[in-house]
Amino acid sequence: MNKQELIDILSSNANNEWLFSRANQVRKENVGDEIHLRGLIEFSNICKCQCKYCGLRSANNQIERYRMSKEEILSYVKNAVNLGYRTIVLQSGEDNYYDTDKMCEIIKEIKKHDIALTLGIGEKSYEEYNAYKDAGADRYLLRIETTDKNLYEEMHPNAKFENRIRCLEDLKTIGYEVGTGCLVGLPNQTIDSLAEDILFFKKIDADMIGIGPFIPHAQTPLKEASIGDFWLALKVMALTRINLPTINIPATTAMETIHNNGRIIALNSGANVVMPNVSDIDCRKKYEIYPNKAGTTEDAKIYRTELETKLLSIGRTISNDKGFRKKF
Ligand code: SAM
Ligand code: SF4
């Protein structure tokens, strides 16, 4: 689709039913009915950044911070592997405590299991990304958040849009499967820029795209801002599926948080991935990027069984493979 077509669809709700069912069909034809589960471990909520939308920003002194040890992380990995997970996602704030050596040690230990490993630990140098890859990491998640440079720099004090792009290019060059994505509903974000976001995903040939509605957090500068619109976020996601048919698209936690059936609606509108949290419930609560985050109370084992039943009820099954993008 060209930019004007994307803008037309994003600007009107008249064709929503068609759009969601078309995206579902494209998903079925290109990546099938299997859902890939990624076991998520949020191993540190300490962050040096100041992203204006995020509850983990360093200026928020009202949350209790934590860091997991290597042993703790490995014990959650082991549990997840025993539950049948074939991919682990390690996510954190930008926490310099985990230097290259520490990260590589953790990666190597995790990769002793026969699983894929995704990292989502922020902006790093080429050398650091390269070292993680050499240690065994397979994929990397780094959302562009918005392709509107002015808005990007307004939302990220002290950060540069060009560096974000540099990171994504480095990750591609090094050979990661690269995940990116955007927030929907940031203050002053336009439909025009959301259309640009989708064109950007296509231009960089992203392998995974996560789309999340923005949810205001009380201890951030955006506490008074309006919450992102679920249906607009879903439209961005559905258009992403139609324009990048073979990629992996998660039904994001933010969607489940703002709509009580958000995950299933997303899975029926182009998504094919779910990322259940497989770590300690106490830490999940402290990883409060926004309030009332879905999935912070369920035991990992019970959740997996319930999820399987839910997915079967919509004609979907859980994949047993590592869930790389089909073209790989
Ligand atoms: N620190 C890493 C990074 O920024 O890439 C990974 C962790 S960060 C918490 C993961 C994602 O959370 C970000 O890419 C951002 O889009 C999302 N996020 C943060 N605050 C949010 C909010 N208030 N509403 C919705 N999503 C949010
Ligand atoms: Fe830190 Fe990521 Fe939150 Fe930004 S979005 S403050 S980098 S955890």
Image (tube, grey):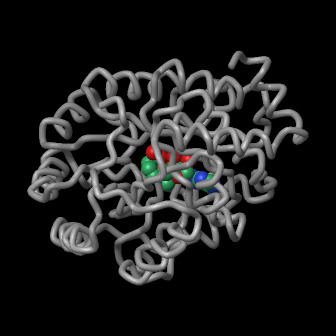
Residue 219: x percent and y percent? 65, 64
Identity of the residue drawn at 11% across and 51% down? 108
Total number of numbered labels? 0
Identity of the residue drawn at 80% across and 58% down? 224
Frontmost residue, 22 versus 11: 22
Q: Is residue 291 left or right of residue 14?
A: left
The quadrant where residue 167 appears: top left
Identity of the residue drawn at 62% across and 50% down? 212
Q: Is residue 57 left or right of residue 6?
A: left
Residue 124: x percent and y percent? 32, 35
Is 299 placed above or below 180 here? below
Identity of the residue drawn at 64% across and 69% down? 291
Frontmost residue, 228 versus 52: 228
Residue 234: x percent and y percent? 70, 47
Quadrant for the C terminus, please: top left
Residue 303: x percent and y percent? 45, 78
Q: Is residue 285 left or right of residue 280?
A: right
Res. 315 in view: yes
The quadrant where residue 77 appears: bottom left
The quadrant where residue 178 appears: top left
Is 213 placed above or below 237 here? below
Res. 49 in view: no
Quadrant for the N terminus, please: top right
